[in-house]
Amino acid sequence: MPIEISGLPTALTGKNNESDIERARSNSNDLNKHQSETTGSTKADTIFITETAAQLQAMETKLAEVPAVDLVRVKDIQQLLESGKYEINADKLADNLLRFETQL
């Protein structure tokens, strides 16, 4: 039994991107038409990736190339801590913590 994936369900994306849905349906119809015109061919599993999914894959690839930790910044802060020159602004720290918590 063939598996045809023509796009992400709107329940998962939270968006109603009608152009992606219509493009996927059109691609599916074209494939079905081609398969019915071709005699003796076996049906294969088909996956259609929406433009949004392709963009997401490209971003994931780029993100994988970025280091998880900025080692230069870590070394700079480590040197400041060791020399006793690192100053902590408690008010700024508290403001940033509150802003972070309210964004969750």
Image (cartoon, grey):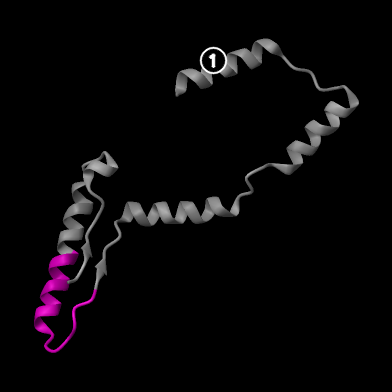
At 84% from the left and 28% from the top, the residue drawn is 80
**Horizontal relation, residue 18 to residue 58: left or right:** left
Q: Secondary structure at mark 1?
A: helix
Is 77 covered by the magenta stretch? no
**Horizontal relation, residue 25 to residue 47: left or right:** left
- Amino acid marked by disc 1: Leu
At 13% from the left and 85% from the top, the residue drawn is 38
Tell me where residue 41 appears, x and y as whole percent. 17, 86
**Horizontal relation, residue 31 to residue 104: left or right:** left
Task: Tell me the quadrant of the picture where the N terminus can be found.
Answer: bottom left
Q: Nearer the viewer, residue 97 or 58?
A: 97
Task: Tell me the quadrant of the picture where the C terminus can be found.
Answer: top left
Task: Name the magenta segment's main secondary structure.
Answer: helix
At 64% from the left and 48% from the top, the residue drawn is 67
Residue tagged by mark 1? 98
Above or below residue 81? Residue 63 is below
- Residues packed near mark 1 inside 10 Å, few (<14), some (14 to 19) or many (20 plus): few
Q: Which residues are magenta?
A: 27-44
Tell me where residue 46 appears, x and y as whole percent. 25, 69
Tell me where residue 37 appears, x and y as whole percent. 10, 82
